[in-house]
Amino acid sequence: MKKRIKHTLSLISLLLVFTSNNLVAQVVLTDSSAIQPVNEYSEYLTDNSGTLTIDSVLSNSHSSEFIKGDNQIPNLGTTKKVLWVRIKIRNLSSTQWVLRIPNPYLDLIELYYPDS
């Protein structure tokens, strides 16, 4: 099962996929990396009904619904819909990283990442 962290800041559920697949566009973190923008590696899924779960989002049935972000700085507008953001990360570092989302208008961010 996936670990879940709730952060009180709602409208975005963030799915981080840590992967070793070199064929997938992904953020690569190394010990020599400084600030690493992830916008160009982000994919977005709009959950119009607000009923999707992490298991349904991870299933193949929704995989093709993710849309690749096309901006360095994403502008998703203002909405009451739930947005799922998927970022594939390959962590080659021994450094502890911080994911910063500088948006004061978010009510809640839920972060999901694989156990291993």
Image (cartoon, rainbow, N blue to C red):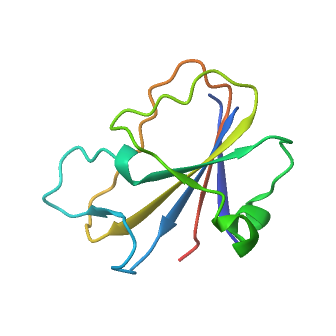
Relative to 62, is 39 on the left or the right?
left
Report the number of numbered marks: 0
* Left or right: 114, with 71 as reference point: right
Along the line of sight, which residue is nearer the eye, 63 or 87?
Answer: 63
Residue 91 placement: quadrant: bottom left
Query: Residue 73 location, x and y as percent?
Result: 37, 32
What residue is drawn where x is 44% and y is 34%? 74
Percent coordinates x, y for residue 95 in the rendering: 27, 59
Q: Nearer the viewer, residue 7 or 86?
A: 86
Residue shown at the point (41%, 37%) measured from the top left: 100
* Residue 79, placed above or below residue 113: above
Q: Is residue 85 left or right of residue 71?
A: right
- The residue at the point 67 percent across, 32 percent down is 108
Residue 92 falls in which quadrant of the image? bottom left
Against 116, is 109 above or below?
above
User: Residue 115: which quarter of the image?
Assistant: bottom right
